[in-house]
Amino acid sequence: MPGRLPIPAGDAPPFRVAYAAASDDRTGQRRLADDVLAVIDFSTEPPEASDAPVVRVPLVQIGAERLQEVWRSPQPVTRGVHDGIRFTRNDAVLFGHLRLGEDGGGTLEALTGELYHRVFAAVRALGYPHVWRMWNFFADINGSEAGLERYRAFVRGRHSALSPVLPRFEQSLPAATAIGCRVPGIVVCFLAATEPAQQVENPRQVSAFRYPLRYGPKSPSFSRAVLKQWGGDAAHLYISGTASIVGDESRHPGQPEAQITEVLDNVEALLAAAAARTGAPLHPSLLRFYLRDPGHADLVAAAAARRFGPVPVMLLEGAICRTDLLLEVEGMAVSAEAETSG
Ligand code: 3EB
């Protein structure tokens, strides 16, 4: 009997993501390594003339040790700029980012529309048309613009840019995060790929793209999670910003401990929904929490460890899109096979 066929190298996960101490990279060399797909650096210091793989996200980290999120590729990467969008890519995936200032006088809605239009045109032109994951950070998320909450203006701008260009709109929405920061402008980063991945929705929640219109004039355009099954049973689950929402309603206003429990229950429900597709368990490999109140950090870290064991956690101060929500978590989960390959 012939042995098991070798898994083609092209089927192994083409990147892995980990947190690394920012202090281990005082000279900034990390960004130059030819296996670095992205470095996500959280700091409210003004961005330097940024090298392609470094995204400066203007949020404050909670805790003594400042971390960076580092994406590494087993294959050498190449870098470039397309229509102002800085990107790094290998044969399978492309990580890109773009920041637009708000001093030009336009509305956030128009700026978001322009940004999404440019990103989705770029990924098509570059041959990575499937956007799996997007992060959005902008100032004053709960403030108002022309009588509309800025988060809702963002949602409307995103919808107007995506609905004409995304085939099978509802099923092909990326997983996403949208968080308020204190620095003006909007920063978007994204993971795009040559191949599609699968949408995973949360059975405990109404799909965001079907939210009733009391939450805004358009429903938010994102999937709860996106699942990619690589070769040899390796799987990645990209988990959107997940809050204390059941059905379409916020739960436990003003109660941090109950919101934390609800958020972790939502993550578990997503992991189970994804495992039902892959046939193998997934567990979180990284969790990034956004807290309105940094005073909740110890509660959150302890609850995450109780629920998931020693998973790497990053804690950031950030505003959530509904004023009654105190926190949100996002992250990545992997199958056992994805930890040993890629
Ligand atoms: C929610 O579930 C919480 O508009 O891109 C989470 C993740 C939220 C992404 C977005 C919004 C977004 O509705 C808010």
Image (tube, rainbow, N blue to C red):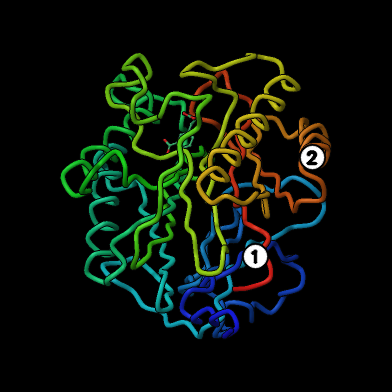
How packed is label 2: few (under 14 Cα within 10 Å), some, or many (20 or more)? some
- Considering the image in quadrants, where does the N terminus appear? bottom right
**What x and y, as percent, mark residue 162?**
24, 44
Q: Residue furthest left?
A: 164
Q: Residue at x 46, y 26 (%)?
A: 142
Rounded to the nearest angstrom, the CA distance separating label 2 from label 1 is 26 Å
Residue beneath disc 2: 301
Residue 26 occupies quadrant: bottom right
Q: Is mark 2 within 8 Å of ligand 1?
A: no
Q: Residue at x 70, y 30 (%)?
A: 293
Q: Residue at x 69, y 48 (%)?
A: 61
- On the rendered structure, is 149 left or right of 299? left
Residue 268 picture quarter: top right
Using the image as rendered, state which of residue 311 and residue 198 is in the foreground: 198
Q: Which element is circle 2 on? A: helix
Task: Point out residue 222 in the picture as x, y percentages from the top left corner.
Answer: 38, 39
Q: Amino acid at mark 1?
A: Glu
Secondary structure of residue under mark 1: helix
Mark number displayed over residue 262? none
Amino acid type shown at disc 2: Ala
Q: Relative to the observer, which residue lies in front, 316 or 266?
A: 266
Q: Which residue is labeled 1 in the image?
A: 337
Using the image, determine if residue 288 lies above or below residue 326: below
Left or right relative to 51: residue 23: right
